[in-house]
Image (spheres, rainbow, N blue to C red):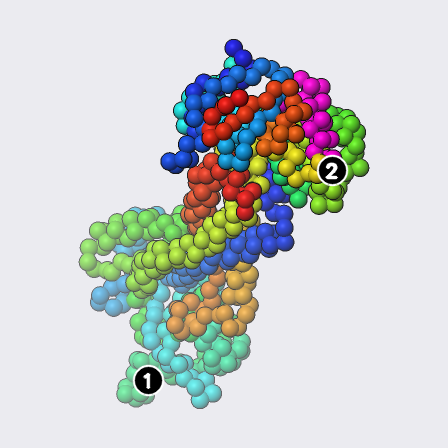
Amino acid sequence: MKSSSYLSILRIVLHGRSAGKILLATMMSFAFSISVILCTFGLMDGFDHLLKSGLRHSSGDILITSPKGFFFLNPELEENLNSISPSAIAPVIQTEAFALYQGQSKGVLVRGVESENFGRATGLEVSVSPGKMVVGYELARQLKLKKGDNVALTLGRGNESSANLPTVKIFQVGSIVKHGIYQKDLRFVYLDRQDLGDLLGVGNRINLAIVSLKKKQRLDDLDAVTQSQQVLRARLDGDYQVKPFWNEYSFLIEAVKVEKLSISLILQLIVVVAVFNILAFVIYIMEKKAQDFFFLRAIGLDLSSLMRFWCVSIFIIWFFSCVGAHLLSMIFNWGLQHLPFLQIPGEIYVLSSLSIKLDFKAYFTVYSVSLLWVMLAAFLGYLRLKRRPIIEGLRQEFSA
Amino acid sequence: MSFIHLEQVEKSFGKTKVLRGINLKIEARELVAIRGASGSGKSTLLYLLGGLDQPTSGKVTIDNKNLTSVGDTELARYRNDCVGFVFQFHFLLPSMTCRDNILLPARIGGKDMVRVEKDTKVLAETLGVTHCLEKFPFEISGGEQQRINIIRALSLRPKILLCDEPTGNLDSKNTEKVATLLKNLAADYGATLLVVTHDDKVASFFPRKIVIEDGQIIG
């Protein structure tokens, strides 16, 4: 079918006041339906991605702890860890404490780290120095902390003068850090490892080693981390616990995966409703323009050309609906990040903020399924026209 | 073999037999009127000849092409290449100017537009409707609409011009004009003309008359 004959038929189809408006409304409803699915997919993928990257940002790739508590990062352990060719190993001391500031207190997890090592192992820049502390973003917000403020930390270890009282030490806020995970932003406090080691009296011992792998794997393909975890588990033989960085939220990641499948199936209903709109449009055109179509067939338009016309038209409707859906999802994504009423409560959703993440696979899945639906609608419309012989159609239409 | 050859053609719609054992031969360039009362089957016969429908049984051969054994695409090409239709209802599409209405069959058939446009211009001048070409159908009179309809039917120089009650909506003065016009144009273009009518006066304009009654040729 030549473009000139396609345009001629299109002109016939769109002639009249209502046809264009109905077409526009059909496209908008279809675009909206597709965007609902895209946004849902995007939210779930975004949640998964942000959660994993946030976790990796504070935990590296693999976490080593000991059932006995504190341990030395001795040459033997280092040799075992080197078997997976890590890019960095960060010794960490972590303990619970209370942060006190102007009469308010918060339970926090204090981490004693070495800035350089920790940064290389996690990618999180934490500049700790003696006497100074780095606090999570949410903690700073809730306690109204700013750089230079003095915060008292009460640690569980017995006071030097009275063993029944906790140790209280004042640190100055050196900087504020953002993990991207609400709970970590609210609870994490970083100190210089030497400072914390001295306070706890553990010397050079640590209770956590963060290992990062050389080749950063994509966050949705974590096989390398799992493989390295298995290697280390075999080598460390029960003396240490070896966990991947997503371990603490693995239930949530699994839940999102299951929800994504079930919700995408349910949301197909929305697409089906939109496809009914398209089918209604096709039937409307077939009825309203039946006389014209039968006449076109009488002057030489064959059924296969008519089918091609419908396919191209439906494809164009689908294409513009997809563009519309993409724009709507971008608007929603912008709203998620800028409009207060769309922002998620971090204490419920773990993450401090959420954005839509859509990759090629998500677009391909949503768009191709919607294309299949609309093509089915086009085919039904075509069958409707094919069923009636030209002469019958012409006579009926003329007598109407 | 004759240009148009029908052998034992029957056509039924459900249980109703509309055409019964039609045998007919028409030579090329013949000018024929098919006359019959309403419901006699004359329009159905015309539509079979135009490839708009298929017979229930029998054989329709036109220009050595058996229309009963070809598929939809070839039949559509036959309608576009060989047949010009003039319907009682002029059937000009309201979304297009008269010129675009005339050029529509050429566009659908992917024809040489330059030649068709040239023919259109000549025909419009001959029929006195040049001033109508850039107008929409609703902007011109009923007589002008019918003349545009005739130009469209002739625009691709068809071998057969099929007219279904072409004067059905016209007064007696215009009826005579249109009947004469069709006869002259078909002769000029070398087309075989078949005009279906229930009007004896219209039929009298054409040298050969076929009379149909109850789906059978009786004269």
Residue behind mark 2: B144
Q: Position of residue A398 (x, y in %)?
A: 56, 42
Residue B139 on the magenta segment: no
Q: Position of residue A318 (x, y in %)?
A: 51, 47
Residue in the picture at 31% in, 80% down: A156
Position of A8 with respect to B136 (left or right) is left
Residue in the picture at 39% in, 57% down: A269
Disc 2 is placed on an element classified as: helix
Disc 1 is placed on an element classified as: strand
- The CA distance from mark 2 to mark 1 is 106 Å
Residue behind mark 1: A166
- Residue segment shown in magenta: B173-193
Q: Amino acid at mark 1?
A: Pro
Chain for mark 2?
Answer: B
Residue B211 shows in this picture: yes
Q: Amino acid at mark 2?
A: Glu
Q: Is residue A223 above or below residue A46?
A: above
Position of A270 with respect to A62 (left or right) is right
| Quarter location, residue B94 | top right
| Quarter location, residue B200 | top right
